[in-house]
Image (cartoon, grey):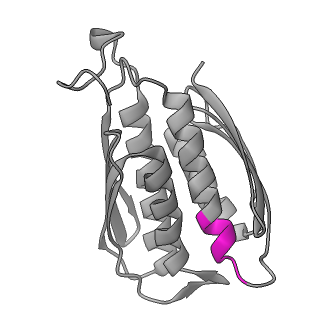
Amino acid sequence: MRTAEITRNTNETRIRVAVNLDGTGRHSLNSGVPFLDHMLDQIARHGLIDLDVHCEGDTHIDDHHTVEDIGIALGQAFAKAVGSKAGLRRYGHAYVPLDESLSRVVVDFSGRPGLFYFVPFTRARIGQFDVDLAREFFQGFVNHALVSMHIDNLRGENAHHQCETVFKAFGRALRMALELDPRSEGVVPSTKGVL
C-alpha cells in the first residue's frame, strides 16, 4: 500500500494529512477554507486518491498560511507514499474542460521541484477565496513532493471554472503519473537508476 500520513504543526497552522495513492477517491476534508475543500475533493475524486486533510489555521488573519501549508503537507505525504518510485509511470498529463474553461496539467515525479504556472484568472476572488492562493498551494506541493509541473489555463471566463479545471486536471495527471506500470515492475523510470 502506498500510503502516508503527515502531521505539520507551526505557529500558524496545525495540519494532519493522510493519503492512499491506490485509493478510490474516498475523502474527509476540513481545511477551514470551504473553497479549498471543494478543490481538494476534485483531487481525490479525479485522481482516485484517498485523501484526509484536517487543519486548524489562523484564518482570522487570512487563508494564506492554511492554503500554503496544506500544499506543503500534501507534497510531503506524496513524497513519502511514492517511495523509491520503482514501477511508476512517472509522467502524467490531463486536459480538463468545464463549460468555457479548459486547463492542462503536466506532471513529472522527477525528484526536482519546478512549477510553471500560467492561470490568468478573470477576477481576484472566488467567493471569499483569493485566487492568488491557488498558486501558493501548488508551489508548496511541488517543492515538497519534488515534482516538476506545468499548469496552464488555456481559456476561461468564469474564475470558478478556471480554478476547478486546474484542480481536476491536477488530479487526473497525478492518477496517470502515479499508476504502476506492469511492464516496468521494480524498475525506476530513469536512466540514472534513481529519482
Residue 120 to residue 33: above or below = below
Asked if 154 appears above or below 61 in the picture, the reply is above
**Where, by quadrant of the figure, is residue 21 drawn?**
top right
Q: Disc count in the image?
A: 0
Q: Is residue 48 visible?
A: no
User: Is residue 63 shown in magenta?
Assistant: yes
Q: Where in the figure is residue 117, as x and y percent of width and height?
A: 33, 68
For image coordinates 76% across by 85% down, the residue present is 61
What's the magenta region? 62-68
Secondary structure that dominates the magenta span: helix
Q: Decide if residue 50 is on the left or right side of residue 87.
A: right
Residue beneath the point at 51% across and 70% down: 136
Q: For the view shown, which residue lies furthest in the left direction?
A: 191
Res 152 quadrant in image: bottom left
In this orientation, which residue lies closer to the viewer: 132 or 61?
61
Residue at horizontal 33%, vertical 18%?
A: 181
Q: Residue furthest front?
A: 11
Q: Residue at x 37, y 35 (%)?
A: 176
Q: Viewed as shown, does residue 158 lie left or right of 69?
A: left
Res 137 seen here: yes
Specify whether 128 is left or right of 169. Answer: right
